[in-house]
Amino acid sequence: MTRALRSPSRGLAAAATVGALLLTPLAVTGALTPAAVADAAADCATPVDVSTLSKGDTVTALSVVSGTTPEEFPGTVLGVVTDGIAPGVDLVMIDFGGTGANPAMDDAGGIWQGMSGSPVYVGDPADGNIVGAIAYGLSYGPSPIAGVTPFSAMDGYLPSASTRSGSVDVTGAEARAISRADASTTTAQAAQGFRRLGSGLTLSGVDATTLATARKAAAKNGLTLATRKFAAASGTAGRAADTTVDDVAAGGNLAASVAYGDITMAGVGTSTSVCGGEVVAFGHPLIQAGEVTYGLHPADAVYIQPDPAWAPFKMANLGDPVGTITQDRLTGITGELGVLPDVASVTSSYTAGSTSKDLSTDVYTSDYLPDVTFYSAYTGTDLVLDGDAMGTQEQTWTITGSHDGEAFTLTGEDTFASSSWWGGYTAAADTANLVYYLGRIDGVEVDSVDVTATQTSEEALSWRVVGVEQRLGGTWKRVTRKHDLVLREGTLHLRAVVRSGGETAHVALPVDIDDVGRGSGYGYVTGGDSLYSRTRAATFEGFVDKLDARVANDEVRLYLRIRGAGTREVVGSLPRDGVVKRSQWFSVTGGAKG
């Protein structure tokens, strides 16, 4: 089924949301060969019963500081917090400090975000006796004291009813033990407990101040979708060209993504164990979404950024996906190497004069399609305009997918105008809004979204409705409060008067009347850019009907209510470039001919 539909919504219900903005090539799709999976480093570690650990026991962690090769980090057990993570799941406290013991950690100031999932072993790591994964750091700031999730809890996971707490409390005795082990940490600071190290979805490639300003501006224009939260610091930096499935190893970098390409939304952490093509990582959730479909990526560590206020964090480049993350649980994420997740593609293109930008992204989790659609459309606009005002933009979009197994293609177009730099947010959110509501309908699967926009003028061409005219006796007469619209059977020849600066234009709005009712009523004409309508619908058919009924920004709608004879609506198109704003109300009387 193919439908050509008019204008998307002015209701910005889509996505000023989390997204890592990266200029990276499109992710590869398909499946890896069995040989490639077999070559991935496997350790098949054996869990250590943490109840057998004693204070002072020595352990060794594996993690990457730079590149893709894990390094060893010696540590000492401080104790075990019973039920520290959840009922039945303890937290092991380990000190990785000591002058000269771990130079990289000394340089960074402590354990870092992105270290989550780093395996901790008793004895030689090669023997595979694994305690668990580094997953928590002290709440107050940087420290070499780590909280470790037991591997036995990561391998089996917990029921979905388990606590979602991202912090772990400690007793007074445990706080004193931490303070004794780390001279830079006071007992009061240690008493604040542990919090998860950052490996959540991250945002890169956009200035935080600019993003905050744009979000506020978008919110003033009706943005209704709640902003997603994402990690404050640790993040992805770009694309790693040389990483392979072989780099997915215990202690090696690992990233999980909901979207990958020019717009990437991902979290970077560390693999805890790789066995039989299955991967366990992070030691805490990415977003704790249960059974999931994420991209599984190797990554190349660029730098560990010290942070004296919080925890240091790792910047890393993502490699192309080499598998699928299938579980996102309280005690970690798991996935399979070799088979890549199904994708929905989001593409966008923006042109202004001789400059253009094309973006393409694979989306693995359908909930994030509106987010990626929004950021893809906006980012292209922002990169091309580079701080200049948006001016006037013509936008077309195409959405493909299926409803209850039947393929569909939806298309639409609209015009936008703004004299500000953030006007691109309004235009970008329009299609994202459609994707958001479409995706909420049962039985709908979206396969692709494409947005193409072109700047038609550097000026924001905006017209305003200033009047309504009716042709009577061969002459156009202004409809005013003193001169009502004259109602009669047949065709009423009406037009909206619109003005931009010193220029005036007319939009034809002829309306057929077959019943004058009681001969009176009222009406108004409104510019499309001043109309707000939603595409929220319970059914796919209802969604399509609402799309058909929409009024574009460069159109004018006539609404006429006749007492005793119902309503009439007519839509006319602006004969010039630009958008139409504002509205004019009028009264209706009957009886005249001509």
Image (cartoon, rainbow, N blue to C red):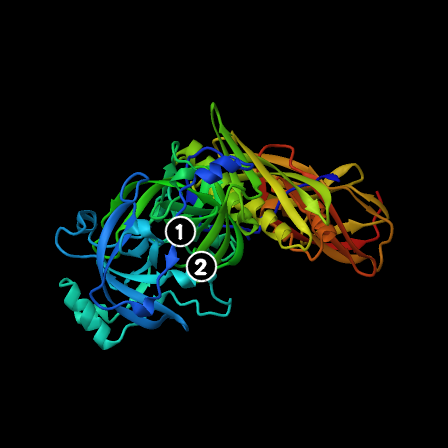
Q: Where residue 459 sits: x, y (%)? A: 48, 33
- The answer, for residue 477, to whether it is visible in the render is no
> Which residue is at the front of the view, 160 or 43?
43
Badge 1 element: strand
Q: What residue is rendered at 51% in x and 32% in y? A: 350
Give me the disc on residue 273: 1
Assess whether mark 1 and mark 2 are in contact (beta carbons under 8 angstroms). Answer: yes
Q: Is residue 187 left or right of residue 49?
A: left
Mark 1 residue type: Ser
Q: Earlier in the sequence, mark 2 or mark 1?
A: 2
Q: Is residue 454 above or below residue 551?
A: above
Q: Is residue 134 above or below residue 176?
A: above
The 10 Å Cα crowd at callout 2, few under 14, some 14 to 19, many 20 or more, is some
Q: What residue is rendered at 36% in x and 48% in y? A: 250
Give me the disc on residue 98: none
Q: Is residue 383 left or right of residue 427?
A: left
Q: Quadrant of the C terminus?
A: top right
Q: Residue furthest bottom?
A: 172
Q: What residue is rendered at 26% in x and 52% in y? A: 312
Badge 2 element: helix
Q: Where residue 218 sits: x, y (%)? A: 47, 50
> Which residue is at the front of the view, 591 or 17?
17
Give me the disc on residue 155: 2
> Which residue is at the front of the view, 371 or 80?
80
Mark 2 residue type: Asp
Q: Residue furthest front?
A: 127
Q: Where residue 551 sits: x, y (%)? A: 66, 45
Q: Is residue 457 above or below residue 67?
A: above
As measured in the structure, the alpha-carbon distance from the residue carrying label 2 to the one carrying label 1 is 9 Å
Q: What residue is rendered at 54% in x and 36% in y? A: 29
Residue 186 found in image quarter: bottom left
Q: Where residue 411 sits: x, y (%)? A: 66, 38
